[in-house]
Image (tube, rainbow, N blue to C red):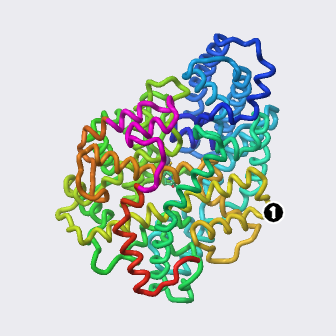
Amino acid sequence: MAAAKTAAESSQPHLNQHQSQSQNPSQSQAKSSTAAVTSDDAKAFIQAAEAELAALSLESNRAEWIYSNFITEDTASLSASVNEKMISTSVRLATEAAKYAAVELDPVNKRKLTMLRSALVLPSPLDPAKNAELAGIVAELNGLYGKGKYCLSDGRCLTQTELSVMMAESRDPALLKEIWAGWREIAKPMRPLFEREVVLANEGARDLGFANLSELWRSQYDMAPDAFSSELDRLWGQVKPLYDSLHCYVRGELNAEYGDKVVPKTGPIPAHLLGNMWAQQWGTIYPLVAPKDADPGYNVTELLAAKGYDEQKMVKQAESFFTSLGFAPLPETFWSRSLFVQPKDRDVVCHASAWDLDNEDDIRIKMCIQKTAEDFTVIHHELGHNFYQRAYKNQPFIFKNSANDGFHEAIGDTVALSITPKYLQQIGLLSDVPDASKDIGLLLKQALDKVAFLPFGLMIDQWRWKVFSGEITPANYNQAWWELREKYQGVKAPLARSEADFDPGAKYHVPGNVPYTRYFLAHILQFQFHRSLCDIAGDKGPVHRCSIYGSKEAGAKLNQMLELGASKPWPEALAVVTGTQEMDASAVLDYFAPLKVWLDEQNSAANRQCGW
Ligand code: X8Z
Ligand code: ZN
């Protein structure tokens, strides 16, 4: 089911992105042993593989949908058996695809073949017993996360969604620490399962000719795996000075709020005080750190409440942004089949996801919506997946995916960057647009979510890749996790941790086996898309004030990129909207330029010693 999570967002559980043919070590073996196969053989194989995968994905999506909406022993077992079939089929096809590696083919079939070979997230060894074992682990890990609860001393047992609300709202360090640690109890039993999952999937990756699962995951970006790692370092280098300024400011303000004993003036920030279970987005502590004279004076959560928005209306409003760009409305089945509200009577996977059940029109979201500004944004995020899925539905099955996985995660966020005061006024949520003197408050709120996220988005897979390659061993899983948390984010655990803990498992995407670098990429790409779409929409003002709402020109250009699916290398898709083939974090820096100046002024006026 891990795979299905990926599927949920990208419509394809088993297939990720493409790999440049020359990078795969198994290539050379294949070349020497298969001189006799022809290009017609290869094309016939590809066609049959696509048909088989398309049929299987339908079966798998249905089973996974039911499991995530109704977690029981029975649905877990059904999920495991379909996943077993999915993994073994994908591995068999990937292995067979290698036979055709040396065959002369047209670019489209060449690309399909490459993707068949390298687009797995969790390959198993060919041995059926190991394959079944892996599928069972996947279902169990998902269930442990989905069913996870922490019981407070007053006896109330709370789900992750409920605990997250408390993390966002409480300002009581003792309570926050209790919840923070309590939620992480659910991850302890995951440790041996995860450890075994890594062994099995690494073996599967090696069978396919990759050094390990890290190399396989990093091979899905139309470039050599090590070149991709260097790209990430480059992008992180571009934005790190901005993150450092934000970190310094926030730590200073939290110190003023909580005092030296709770938040020292120097060193990493205790991770339980940033308004989020994983300290990944800090927007909910905006009121604690808001600028004195540049606060915009409204908050979207309150506006939604004042106008009587329920979950359905929040989704309708988000849909109407997409239709304003020229996209067709969501189908009737979206409304009857999606899950918006956490059911009281059963365990569900509440982590928000978007699904494409039949790779055509049966698109849905599954989300335990809170009536907050944060979830209003997440709804746009999820609908971005759905509109992407529908835009590429006419592609052949293997190309029914995003240009790279970061693109899938970036589309809804790009649209949500247009939720500006002007837009809120246009849709009747806000009566008066604050003047430009309040921009710093708005930018700070945005940076608490978007800039704070960047090192988190990066560190999760820095940890996993090292786990996969063996550089991090089970004996130091947790310690290495916290070393990376400190290195990238400058945060620390609020209480002692040990190897009895498995803190990575308390983050959905680790037990869910969803690669995470996609979100780092998305947080860069969305600013590139936004800047370019604002140009196309003819917006002349500063980019942080721009909303593309209602721009059919911007929508048409966006659609042109989306409908390509995965049929072209991602740099070509990127160029459709942005005119460039390079990922470039200068769009992030442009957007936050006034804030960076302001943060540095604040930090130096308060004589803060930045860094940790
Ligand atoms: O998992 C998600 C989406 C579903 S693809 C809600 N996100 C990451 C997370 O929650 O950790 C969006 C931002 C990062
Ligand atoms: Zn997503």
Name the residue rendered at 49%, 39% in the picture. 571
Furthest toward the bottom, the residue is 260
Q: Is residue 258 above or below residue 180?
A: below
Q: Is residue 263 above or below residue 89?
A: below
Q: Secondary structure at mark 1?
A: helix
Which residue is disc 1 drawn over? 475
Q: Is residue 509 magenta?
A: no
The kind of residue on which mark 1 rests is Ala
Residue 43 sits in which quadrant? top right
Residue 553 sits in which quadrant? top left
The answer to whether residue 206 is visible is: yes
Q: Is residue 573 magenta?
A: yes
Image spot of residue 463 (x, y percent) = 67, 58
Asked if residue 543 lies left or right of residue 3, the reply is left
Residue 189 sits in which quadrant? bottom right
Quarter of the picture containing the C terminus is bottom right
Asked if residue 481 lies left or right of residue 538, the reply is right
Q: Is residue 183 above or below residue 583?
A: below
- Magenta range: 557-586
Crowding at mark 1 (Cα within 10 Å: few <14, some 14-19, many 20+): few
